[in-house]
Image: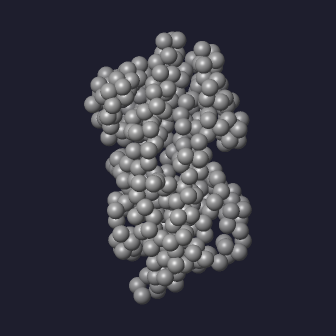
Amino acid sequence: MSCEVGNPLNELGERVAILGWYGDFNVGNDMLLLGVLFHLRRSAPNSRLIVFSWHPKATAKLCGDEAQVFFFHKILSVMPKVDTLVIGGGTLLTDWRLTLPLFIPFALIALWSKSLGKKVVLYGVGVERFCTRIGKFLARKFVNAADLIVVRGYQSLEKLKVLGCEKKIFVKSDIAFRLPPPSEKERMEILMRILGSRNLEASRRSFKVIICPKHSSENNMIEKTLAEVADKLIEKFGAKVVFLPMSTSLYDDDRKAINRIVKMFRRSREITSLRGRYSPSEVMALIGWSDLVISMRLHPLIISAKMGKPAIALAGASTPIAPPSLDKISEVIEFIQKKSAYKNMDDISICHINVDADQIISKIRELLPTCGYYPRCLKHAHS
C-alpha cells in the first residue's frame, strides 16, 4: 500500500538519532542531512537531534546548532539512550558491489535498535534492485521492522514491494527540494569569495555553464565528451564554463575527473576548474549564477530546478560504491514532473552517458530559449 504525504513525521520522542552517509564530503549527502534536519525541526521542534557522521567536525560545521554530532562508532553507546532512529536519505538500500558491506551495518543497526524498543524511520530513501541473497534477506527484515517508510519515488516503492515489504510506504519528493536557497546578499558574498570580482564582472554578459562530472573509472568516454562539449561551448557560444565537484572524498573525488578532463581541453586556459569543498549554499549560489547546468550527479539537477535553471542530466554512470545513476535520476525527476511542484523540471533533459558531444550541443540549442542568454550568446549560437 502506498500514498503521498505532506508531513508524516510525528511523535518521535525527546531524543532522535539520524544515520546516513554523512561526513563523506559529498554535497548531495550534505543537502540530504540538512533536509532531514529541516523536516524534523518542523515536525518535532522540541526533540534533541543527534547525527552520526564519518567526519564529525565537518558535519558539526554544516549543522551548526541544529544537532549534536558524534563519530559513527559512538552509535553503540548512544542508541540505547534515544527514542527514535531516523535513517535517510539518499540511496541507502542497495547491495551494489562494494555497497553490500556498507549496507549490512545499516540494516543490523536498525534491527538492533528495534530490539531495544526504539522507533525506526526510513526517511527520503532511494532503493535499488538487490542482487545478493544476504542483501535481499537483510533488506526485507530491515524494511519490515521500520515504523515509518518514506521513499523518494515510485520506482523505489515498487522495488520495496518486490523485496517483500509489508508496511505502508509513503512517497515524497527528494528531501533536498525543500531546502531554502541563500538570500541575494549571501549569494553575492559566496560568488565574490569563490569566483572573485574579476571573473564575476567578465562573465556578466557571458553564457554561463556549470558542468558537474562524476569520478568513475568505468567510463572514460564521457570525460572525453565533456571536454569536447566545453570546447564547443566556448567556440560556438562564447560561454564561460565552470567545472564544479560535488564529491571530494578520498574514495570518490570528482576533482580527479575534472583534472583528467582539463588535460583533454584545447582551450584549458579559458575554463574555470573549482577545486575546493563546497557547502550546499555555495553550490546553490553558483548554480543560481549560471544559465545552464550539465551534470552526471543528481543534486545539481535538483538545485537547478529550485534556482530556475535548465539542465542536462548525463545518466548511467556507476562506481564500485554507486549503482548506475539512470534509475535514480529518472525516478526523482519524473516524480517531481508528475507533481508539477517545480515548473523548471520540464527544462531538464535526460541523456545517457554514451551520448556524443554534438548531441549534447544539440540539446543545449533546444534549451537556449529558457537559458536567459544575452544577444551576444544568441549570435554565437547560430553561427
For the N terminus, which image quadrant? Answer: top left
Left or right side of 188 for 132: left
Q: Residue at x 61, y 59 (%)?
A: 285
Left or right side of 77 for 221: left
Tell me the colour scheme of the image. one colour
- Name above or below for residue 241 compared with residue 274: below
Q: Position of residue 65 (x, y in %)?
A: 71, 35
- Name above or below for residue 38 compared with residue 143: below
- The answer to whether one can see residue 383 in this image is yes
Q: Residue at x 49, y 82 (%)?
A: 235
Left or right side of 89 for 279: right
- Name above or below for residue 355 compared with residue 60: below
Q: How many marks?
A: 0
Q: Position of residue 173 (x, y in %)?
A: 43, 42
Of residue 120 and residue 109, the one placed in the foreground of this image is 109
Q: Position of residue 378 (x, y in %)?
A: 46, 82
- The answer to whether one can see residue 366 in this image is no
For the C terminus, which image quadrant? Answer: bottom left
In the displayed orientation, state which residue is furthest to the top.
116
Q: Which quarter of the figure has residue 78?
A: top right
Q: Which quarter of the figure has residue 323?
A: top left
Of residue 79 and residue 47, the one placed in the foreground of this image is 79
- Name above or below for residue 277 compared with residue 46: below
Q: Residue at x 66, y 29 (%)?
A: 70
Q: Position of residue 193 (x, y in %)?
A: 72, 62
Q: Residue at x 49, y 26 (%)?
A: 105
In the displayed orientation, state which residue is furthest to the left.
162
